Amino acid sequence: MRNLKLTLSILAVAAAFGGLAAHAETAPAKTGHIAIRGGGSQPYALVRPGRDGTSGSGDRADWKDIEAAKRAIPGEFLWFRHDDGKAYVVRDAGVVAKVAEAWAPVDRLGAEMEGYGREMEQHGKKMEGLGRQMEQVRGDRDAERKLDKLAREQQRLARQMEKLGRKMEDANAEQRASLRRQMDDLGVQMRELGRQMGQQGEQMGRAQQPMHDISMQMHEASKPMDALGKQMNVLGKQMEIEARAAEQATRALIKDAMAKGLAAPAPAA
């Protein structure tokens, strides 16, 4: 049972990130209220000192240029790299406001996702406590070994789910669809393993009443986690739709800014 406690804790956290989407491993963390995304043919970022950064598209190669522009330009601006490979900035307040408005629904949904994540974490702590109790109860060693094996597999899948969750927010439309399918597949596998773990727990419970009691408590404790997981999955799909719309709106605003002469060459790094 040594692995069960760790698995339950990681599973709760991973589930919290599974529908969410956090930051991609290939993208830098938010610093100085700037956020850029991995992928995309035209990287961009909205810089808003003193406010939360909005979502953008890009990778680590663009980070140095964005930071240089931030140091050189006071106030808010939109940075992007055009198809010609050159970097530009737009300081027009109207354009900046429209880009922020385009991503506002994604930011709002992201805040909701974080709230669900905190709830999931609290339920995970409860499961962790039950896991510690179960460790103290001696039962069927064969069933315990099987449960340990299932727990390790749950842990492996939870880590995969967490990685996909980190990639979701920063992915482009095609990548998000692929990530959703992968997350759905992992969810099916995790539910099946959960069912098997429940069976093993019941087997151990029949051999020893205290184990059975804890198993039933774990089963009940898993219900709100399952409900939260479903809510987060729905929210993740909404974020996917809103992010696609925000991406399209931002591209259109960039194109319009170029046509109107509102874009100026970005300061060199």
Image (cartoon, rainbow, N blue to C red):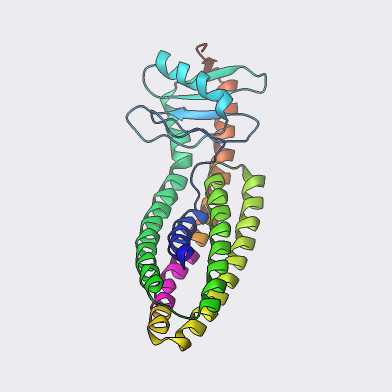
Compare residues 123 and 46 and report the one nearer the observer.
123
- In the image, residue 114 above or below residue 264: below
Q: Position of residue 181 (x, y in %)?
A: 65, 57
Q: Residue at x 57, y 36 (%)?
A: 26
Compare residues 1 and 234 and report the one nearer the observer.
1
Q: Position of residue 131 (x, y in %)?
A: 40, 69
- In the image, residue 177 above or below residue 248: below
Q: Is residue 161 visible?
A: yes
Magenta-tinted stretch:
217-230
Q: Residue at x 38, y 65 (%)?
A: 128
Quadrant in the picture for residue 167: top right
Q: Residue at x 40, y 24 (%)?
A: 76
Q: Residue furthest left?
A: 50
Q: Is residue 262 visible?
A: no
Q: Position of residue 145 (x, y in %)?
A: 55, 72
Compare residues 252 and 196 and report the one nearer the observer.
196
Q: Is residue 128 magenta?
A: no
Q: Position of residue 205 (x, y in %)?
A: 45, 84
Query: Mostly what secondary structure, the magenta segment?
Result: helix
Quadrant in the picture for residue 33: top left
Q: Is residue 225 magenta?
A: yes
